Each structure stands twice: as C-alpha cells, then as structure tokens.
Image: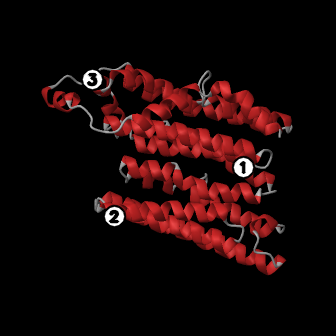
C-alpha cells in the first residue's frame, strides 16, 4: 500500500477514536465510530485475498448494523427526553438499545459470531488493530453511559466469558483463538462496568498490553496456526521461553500482570453480593486457561517436524523491529506489583 494512503488511513483511524473520546453529543460520537470503521476497511482489504475481502464485507455489515442501531437509539432518546447528551441518558429503552449496539460493535456474546470469522481473514497486523484499537471507542461510550441495566450487563458478561472460553477450546488457528480470548476478556470488563468503571478501564488497558504483546510474538514468528508455533525455538529461543509466560498472563495466572484485573474484579463482585456470579466467572476463566496452556505446550514442549522442507524458513533472521515487543512483553509479565497503586486509584 502507498505510504501516503496508509498514513491517511491511520490518521483517520486515530481521529475517529479521538472524536468519540472527546464527544458529549451522540451524533459526534456516532460520526467518530463511522470514521473509525471507514478508515480500517481499506486496511483490511489491502491484500485482495478472497478471505480478506469476505472478512471486510462481514465487518462492514456488522459495524453498519451497530452504527444504525446506535443512531436509532440516540434519536429515540432525544425524542423521549429532549437530550442529545451522552451522560444524560435516563430512559431505559434507549440505554438498553445503545448497550446492545455497542456490544455488537465490540463483539460481546451473544453478538460475537462475526469476530472470529473476521479476524481469521485478516493478516496479523490488521488483526492486532482490530483486537486492540477498535475496542477503545465503543468502550469509552459504554463507560460514559454507565448502563443501569444490571441484569443485561451481567448476562452479557457471563455469556461472553463462557463462550470466549468454550469457543477457543477446539481451535487450531491462532487468530481465532485470539478472537475468543478477546470475547472472554470483554466479558470480564462488562461484568464489573456498572460497579466500578475505573476497574473496567484498568482491565481494558491490561488486555490491550497483553494482546499487543501476543500478536507481536505471532508476527515475529510468522505463525498463524498452532503447528507453526513449534518452529519458533530456532528463530528466537529467548522469546520462545518467555511466550508461555505471556500466554499465562492472558490466562490470568499470578504472579503475572493478567492476574491483577481478574483478582480485583472478583473482589468487587463479591463486595456487591454477587458471589455466585464471581464463582461462575472464575470457572469460565479455567476454560480460557486451557487453550493458553495448549499454545504454551505447542510452543515450548513439542519438537517441530524435522524434514528438509521445514528446515529452510527456521534459519531466516527476522528484520522486524523488536523494541515494541520487548516493552509490551515486559509490561505483560511484570506489572502485578503496581496493584496497590491501582487499588489506591480505585479508592479515589
């Protein structure tokens, strides 16, 4: 792709998200989301592969549906209450509609079916943008409206953690596994949204760091399925020994960064007399942990097939920039000691 076109599209992507972040009016927020969608579509279809075009079409139709639903709900809210302000949502009907529209946009279960299919059709770089940057604007709106419909949010959250864990169990494609991982993490964020918006934000930030790190590992190894992970030991032995820790951090094991949000969310749910919900969420986290362990096993404890055809690509040194990977991997592994600081911020 022409670098000027690429720069323009990335600028549009950033501008769309920034407009949504900064807006207090529903029409502006909707416009930011639309800019975001339109800017990523050429990036998704740039390789002109049938799968990429199919994924782009699915993504466009889903996002257009979500945006239309959002516009309809905000217009309904203006009709019922005379308010276009995002933080002045008072009527339950538009709040429920907007929550469902934003759930469709980010891929919360049961509105998740498009996410694994779309992510599977994309290259790893565009998949990284879709799994991280594209989640930020809808979540900013969800945090701003703070939906009071507790039953809906808890149902969305529990369904997402369950389907995110269950769906990833039988997958061999890394991008689909990352899509189900994304659904499960989004479920955790939504579970605690109404009780502690700051905790949702903290979970989103840690999820972005961990997912960024994982995608960069796959990109460096040029891996798209579980079998190709086994060849990574010859390309980057140090990274191969660290990657299981990155994956287990995504799974939420102590003493890694990913444990912090899960720990605080379970604590908050228990404080709100939702011990059963917290127990269910913790049990569904075990499903996700299984497929992260599967990836770790495939990467470090299995030998790659030792045939002549397989030997050549292993020895080629990578020319990719590794500084972002180094920073994000360090953050993925070592941020748990900052938990007291996060708790202090929660108390403010």
Residue positioned 61% across, 42% down in the render = 205
Which disc, if any, is residue 213? none
Q: x%, y% of residue 92? A: 81, 66
Horizontal and vertical percent for residue 153?
Answer: 73, 52
**With respect to residue 151, does 81 lie above or below?**
below
**Badge 1 is on which residue?**
155
99 with respect to 334 (left or right): right
Q: Secondary structure at mark 2?
A: helix
Question: Which numbered disc, 2 or 3, marks the residue closer to the eye?
Answer: 2
The relative height of residue 207 versus residue 298 in the rendered view (above or below) is below
In this orientation, which residue lies closer to the viewer: 220 or 164?
220
Q: CA distance from mark 2 to mark 3?
A: 36 Å
Depth check: give the residue in front, 178 or 17: 17
From the image, state whether disc 3 or disc 1 is nearer to you: 3
Q: Percent x, y for residue 63?
A: 53, 65
Residue found 34% across the figure and 30% down from its top: 229
Residue 15 position within the rendered picture, expressed as x and y whole percent measured from the top left: 53, 64
Q: Residue at 57% across / 61% down in the picture?
A: 17
On the image, numbered disc 2 is attached to which residue?
Answer: 4
Q: Which label's residue is closer to the chain start, 2 or 1? A: 2
Q: Is residue 272 left or right of residue 136?
A: right
Secondary structure beneath label 1: helix
Residue 205 shown left or right of residue 213 in the figure:
right
Read off the residue under disc 3.
Answer: 234
Instruction: Confirm whether residue 163 shows in the render.
Output: no
State the image quarter where residue 30 is shown: bottom right
Cβ atoms at labels 3 and 1 below 8 Å apart: no
Lower sequence index among marks 2 and 3: 2
Position of the C terminus by quadrant: top right
| Quadrant placement of the N terminus | bottom left
């Amino acid at each position: 792709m022409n670098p000027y076109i690429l720069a323009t599209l990335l600028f549009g992507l950033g501008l769309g998200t920034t407009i949504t972040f900064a807006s207090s009016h529903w029409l502006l927020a909707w416009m930011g989301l639309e800019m975001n969608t339109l800017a990523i579509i050429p990036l998704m279809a740039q390789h002109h592969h049938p799968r990429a075009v199919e994924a782009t079409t699915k993504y466009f139709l889903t996002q257009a549906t979500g945006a239309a639903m959002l516009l309809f709900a905000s217009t309904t809210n203006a009709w019922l209450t005379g308010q276009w302000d995002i933080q002045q949502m008072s009527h339950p009907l538009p709040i429920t509609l907007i929550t469902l529209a934003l759930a469709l946009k980010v891929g919360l279960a049961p509105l998740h079916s498009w996410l694994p299919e779309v992510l599977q059709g994309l290259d790893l770089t565009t998949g990284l943008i879709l799994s991280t940057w594209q989640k930020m604007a809808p979540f900013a709106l969800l945090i701003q409206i703070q939906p009071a419909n507790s039953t809906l949010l808890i149902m969305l959250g529990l369904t997402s953690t369950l389907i995110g864990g269950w769906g990833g169990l039988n997958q061999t494609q890394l991008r689909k596994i990352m899509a189900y991982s994304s659904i499960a993490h989004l479920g955790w964020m939504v579970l605690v949204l109404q009780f502690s918006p700051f905790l949702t934000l903290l979970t989103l930030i840690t999820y972005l760091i961990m997912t960024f790190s994982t995608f960069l590992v796959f990109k460096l190894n040029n891996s798209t399925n579980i079998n190709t992970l086994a060849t990574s030991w010859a390309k980057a032995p140090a990274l191969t020994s660290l990657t299981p820790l990155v994956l287990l951090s995504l799974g939420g094991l102590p003493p890694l960064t990913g444990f912090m949000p899960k720990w605080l969310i379970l604590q908050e749910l228990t404080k709100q007399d939702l011990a059963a919900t917290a127990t269910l969420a913790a049990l569904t986290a075990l499903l996700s942990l299984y497929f992260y362990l599967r990836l770790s096993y495939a990467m470090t404890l299995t030998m790659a097939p030792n045939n002549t055809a397989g030997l050549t690509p292993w020895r080629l040194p990578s020319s990719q920039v590794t500084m972002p990977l180094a920073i994000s991997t360090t953050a993925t592994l070592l941020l748990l000691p900052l938990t007291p600081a996060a708790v202090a911020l929660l108390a403010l």
